[in-house]
């Protein structure tokens, strides 16, 4: 099992023994700090409340010393084992991490073990250096610098245990975006049925249609122009065709229906049956539309 | 097949896997039924296949994200770690750890540094010292006076209630085990941090021991420290050794990359640190309940003897390299 990350977008790819690659989004220092502060707050609150309860109950029973003793033991356990215990039993999460939606996993993407959980929390002390305010307030400069120096945002404790912190991804399954406008249907008829949509173009189309509802019409036209203009020339459409509608039509054709209307399907004998049943659409290089972001950017 | 049709046909499978994952995340793995486990495996393989072919199927990025997340979750359930294996842990603590420690150079160094500096400081702070003001220079006048004040009363005339012992035991766990763990963590800084903490503690303790021999309340002092001494001082040496193991692995990597070397050393140092914590807790129990109690000195000396014997048994008898291990 191995993992690699692309240096730009903070995604890390894990390759499982089944030879499947899936991605995690790495959590950087600026989401882990609030999680840490939340945990610290919770620790102090726990120590305070438990200490009060113990001292009052045991104190009223005439044993204030025992109350203080147990409070010290609680303080010790919470100070040193809070993170380790939570991360062991909550599968890599503490309350603060859960609140921020992050989780500790090994660099192989697996759940962490008890030893890793405890050790990475012990070594937080070194990440917290240098200490300010009479060596009680950790400034976390070691941890921050260490995070910024490696690809997985690991602090020293993480490196020693082979762990990393990732975002919990919990987006549900959304259906496909659908665009059903008269202009789109009209344009769909104008697209040559044999026109292959390669992988890059398909991805760009789907991203565009997913996000277009957030844009004003002018912005849509501006964005769509880069892809739509060369397409218009290719299909022989007038240059003032709406780029937005053209992309939506192409999207509908490649993702949702083979042909825009049912009756068209019957009188379209020239339809290429290999276009989308084929496992490798990129194999149809011959005459395919060569679209790449670099090229359009150059234009 | 079109992406829309494919989505329609797989949606239910994915949802089912999602629900199974949620169920497994909540309950313990072993409580799942056999059918649900085999169903889970089948669904996981199917989801893996869908993800592998996502590009070829022209699935939209939103769906691919969902699949990544789904496969990640299912993967974590399939390869989840055993929470805590008591048998393996016992094997590690009582068989492998003492043998590793027996030939651990970090522990030897830690032991020599601690006891060497401890004895030298003790000598320098005692009456035979060539440096008369040594104790005051190292520990400070206030600390020494405080120590003298603490042991002014003989322990046998101690009239604190029994429940005060609980307070002291709690305090010692918090304070001493905290110091030990700090010693351990500081070792990560190339071993220098741990060495510093070790030298500091050894010099301070040695000085106090040396100074206490020169004053009138020395009997009370040694009456107090006898019983818990072996466990506590061994725990300091151990935790520093565990920290140094971490730090030295960064210097002498044995041909590995520094990160890998550190990871390997961390796996070995962790049980040592846990042993140190256990010793600290034992020492705190003795220090809280036995040391301050008005028991006769012979009982405390017996506790001292038993702890020394236990430590020797652990480090020497369990630690001696065995023939069968070398063969195997």
Image (cartoon, coloured by chain):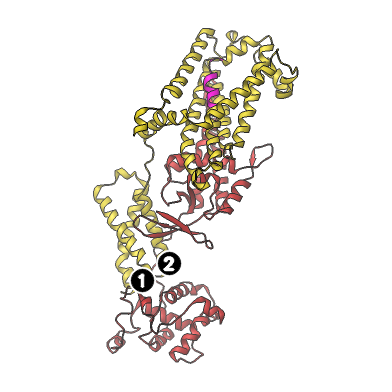
Front position among marks 1 and 2: 1
Residue located beneath label 1 in the image: B56
Asked if A208 appears above or below B235 in the picture, the reply is: below
**Which of the 4 quarters of the picture holds residue B317?**
top left
Q: Which chain is painted in red?
A: A
Give the residue drawn at x 52%, y 11%.
B301
* First to last magenta residue range: B226-235
The question of residue B134 being in magenta is answered with no
> x, y percentage for residue B218?
64, 11
Under tag 2, what secondary structure?
helix
Residue located beneath label 2 in the image: B62
**Which of the 4 quarters of the picture holds residue B31?**
top left
The reply to the same-chain question for discs 1 and 2 is yes
Any part of residue A61 in sight: no
Give the residue drawn at x 30%, y 63%.
B12
In depth, the one of A191 and A186 nearer the eye is A191
Discs 1, 2 touching: Cβ within 8 Å: no
Residue B297 is marked as: none
Q: Which chain is painted in yellow?
A: B
Quarter of the image that includes the C terminus of chain A? bottom right
């Amino acid at each position: 099992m191995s993992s690699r990350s692309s240096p730009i977008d903070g995604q890390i790819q894990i390759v499982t023994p089944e030879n499947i690659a899936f991605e995690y989004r790495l959590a950087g220092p600026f989401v882990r700090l609030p999680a840490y502060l939340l945990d610290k707050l919770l620790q102090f609150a726990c120590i305070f409340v438990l200490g009060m309860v113990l001292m009052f109950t045991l104190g009223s029973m005439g044993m204030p010393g025992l109350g203080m003793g147990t409070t010290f033991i609680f303080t010790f356990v919470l100070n040193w084992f809070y993170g380790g215990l939570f991360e062991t039993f909550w599968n890599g999460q503490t309350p603060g991490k859960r609140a921020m939606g992050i989780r500790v996993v090994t660099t192989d993407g697996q759940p962490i073990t008890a030893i890793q959980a405890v050790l990475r929390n012990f070594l937080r002390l070194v990440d917290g250096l240098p200490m300010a305010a009479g060596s009680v307030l950790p400034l976390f400069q070691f941890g921050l610098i260490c995070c910024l120096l490696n690809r997985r945002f690991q602090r020293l404790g993480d490196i020693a245990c082979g762990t990393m912190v990732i975002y919990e991804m919990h987006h549900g399954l959304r259906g496909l975006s659908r665009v059903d406008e008269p202009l789109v249907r009209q344009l769909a008829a104008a697209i040559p049925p044999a026109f292959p949509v390669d992988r890059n173009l398909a991805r760009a189309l789907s991203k565009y249609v997913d996000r277009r509802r957030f844009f004003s019409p002018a912005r849509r036209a501006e964005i769509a122009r880069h892809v739509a203009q060369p397409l218009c020339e290719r299909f022989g459409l007038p240059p003032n065709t709406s780029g937005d509608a053209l992309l939506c039509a192409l999207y509908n054709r490649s993702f949702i229906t083979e042909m825009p209307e049912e009756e068209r399907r019957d009188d379209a004998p020239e339809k290429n049956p290999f276009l989308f049943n084929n496992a490798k659409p990129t194999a149809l290089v011959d005459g395919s539309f060569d679209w790449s972001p670099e090229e359009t950017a150059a234009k | 097949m079109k992406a829309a049709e494919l989505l329609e046909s797989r949606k239910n499978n994915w949802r089912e896997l999602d629900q199974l994952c949620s169920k497994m995340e909540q309950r313990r793995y072993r409580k799942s039924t056999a059918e649900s486990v085999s169903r889970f495996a089948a669904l996981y393989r199917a989801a893996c296949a869908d993800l592998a072919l996502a590009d070829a199927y022209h699935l939209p990025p939103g769906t691919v994200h969902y699949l990544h997340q789904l496969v990640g979750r299912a993967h974590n359930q399939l390869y989840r770690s055993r929470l805590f294996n008591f048998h393996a842990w016992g094997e590690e603590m009582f068989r492998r750890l003492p043998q590793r420690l027996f030939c651990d150079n970090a522990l030897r160094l830690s032991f020599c540094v601690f006891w060497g500096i401890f004895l030298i400081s003790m000598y320098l702070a005692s009456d035979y010292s060539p440096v008369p003001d040594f104790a005051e220079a190292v520990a400070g006048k206030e600390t020494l006076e405080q120590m003298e004040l603490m042991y002014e009363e003989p322990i046998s005339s101690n009239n604190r209630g029994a429940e005060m012992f609980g307070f002291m035991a709690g305090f010692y766990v918090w304070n001493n085990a905290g110091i030990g763990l700090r010693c351990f963590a500081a070792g990560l800084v190339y071993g220098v941090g741990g060495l510093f903490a070790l030298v500091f503690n050894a010099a301070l303790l040695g000085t106090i021991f040396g100074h206490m021999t020169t004053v009138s309340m020395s009997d009370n002092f040694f009456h107090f420290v006898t019983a818990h001494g072996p466990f506590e001082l061994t725990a300091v040496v151990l935790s520093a050794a565990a920290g140094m193991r971490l730090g030295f692995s960064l210097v002498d990597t044995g041909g590995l990359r520094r990160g890998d070397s550190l990871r390997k050393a961390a796996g070995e140092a962790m049980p040592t640190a846990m042993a140190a914590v256990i010793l600290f807790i034992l020492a705190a129990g003795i220090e809280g309940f036995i040391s301050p109690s008005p028991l006769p000195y012979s009982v405390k000396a017996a506790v001292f003897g038993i702890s020394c014997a236990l430590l020797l048994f652990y480090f020497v008898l369990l630690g001696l390299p065995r023939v069968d291990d070398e063969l195997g």
